[in-house]
C-alpha cells in the first residue's frame, strides 16, 4: 500500500515542485492577408495555417500549408526578430522591419497576440478607441472587428493606401 501511494504521490509532488509561470495559450487557426496594389507594387495575398505563441515581447508565429508544411516562422525577443523560410534565415531589428521586408507593409505583429485574443494591445502608446456596440476597437491605425469573434472569426484592416486586411478563423472557442 505504501509503495502504491508513493508511486502516486511522488510524481505529483515532483510536478508541483517544477511548476513555472503559465505561458500564454497558443492560438491556432487559419490566417489570410490581403494587401491591395499600390503605385508600382502588385497586390499580395497569403492564406496559411498559423500557430502563434508568446506575446509582444517574445514569441513565435509559424505559417503552414494545409498539409502542415511550414512556409515561414517568425521568432522575436528583445531587440531582434528572425524570419526563417526555405530560403534561409534573416534577422531584423524588430517585427515591423520583418513584416515590411516580407510583405512590403508594416503589420501590427507585436499587437497580434492581444488582438487575436479580442483585446487591445496594452503596450501601445496609441490608446484603443472602442467601436459602437462593443463590436471591436481601433488601435495603431487599424480597425479590429470582433462582430463574429464568438464564432472564432476575426478581422482587422488598415485603410490605405494600400489597404491591408488580415482575417483569421481561430481554432476552438475564443
Image (tube, grey):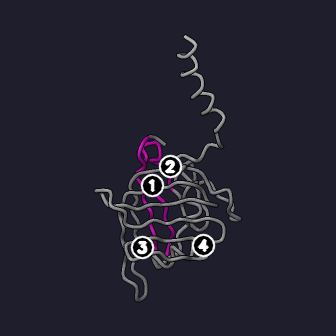
- Residue most toward the left? 67
Taking 63 as reference, is 171 above or below it?
above
Give yes or no for contact between labels 3 and 2 (Cβ–Cβ under 8 Å): no
Helix, strand or loop at label 3? It is strand
Density class for disc 4 (Cα within 10 Å; few <14, some 14-19, many ≥20) is: some
Q: Return the disc, 2 or 1, that comes first in the chain's sequence.
A: 2
| Residue at (64% x, 61% y) in the render | 57
User: For numbered disc 1, what is the local secondary structure?
Assistant: strand
Neighbours of disc 1 within 10 Å: few (<14), some (14-19), many (20+)? some
Q: Give the CA separation, mark 2 to mark 1.
A: 7 Å
Residue that mark 1 sits on: 51
Furthest toward the bottom, the residue is 40
- Indicate yes or no whether the magenta region holds residue 158: yes
Mark closer to the chain start, 3 or 4:
3
**Residue designated by label 2:** 26
- Given residues 172 and 1, the one toward you in this image is 1
Pointer 4 residue:
94
The extreme front residue here reads 3
Amino acid at each position: 500500500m505504501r509503495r502504491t501511494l508513493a508511486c502516486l504521490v511522488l510524481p505529483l509532488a515532483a510536478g508541483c515542485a517544477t511548476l513555472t509561470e503559465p505561458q500564454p495559450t497558443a492560438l491556432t487557426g487559419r490566417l489570410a492577408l490581403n494587401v491591395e496594389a499600390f503605385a508600382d507594387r502588385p497586390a499580395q495575398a497569403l492564406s496559411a495555417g498559423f500557430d502563434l505563441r508568446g506575446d509582444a515581447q517574445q514569441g513565435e508565429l509559424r505559417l503552414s500549408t494545409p498539409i502542415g508544411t511550414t512556409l515561414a516562422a517568425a521568432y522575436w525577443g528583445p531587440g531582434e526578430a528572425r524570419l526563417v523560410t526555405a530560403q534561409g534565415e534573416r534577422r531584423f531589428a524588430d517585427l515591423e522591419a520583418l513584416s515590411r521586408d516580407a510583405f512590403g507593409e508594416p503589420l501590427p505583429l507585436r499587437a497580434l497576440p492581444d488582438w487575436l485574443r479580442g483585446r487591445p494591445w496594452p503596450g501601445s502608446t496609441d490608446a484603443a478607441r472602442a467601436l459602437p456596440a462593443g463590436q471591436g476597437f481601433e488601435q495603431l491605425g487599424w480597425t479590429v472587428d470582433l462582430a463574429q469573434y464568438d464564432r472564432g472569426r476575426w478581422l482587422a484592416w488598415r485603410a490605405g493606401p494600400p489597404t491591408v486586411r488580415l482575417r483569421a478563423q481561430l481554432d476552438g472557442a475564443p
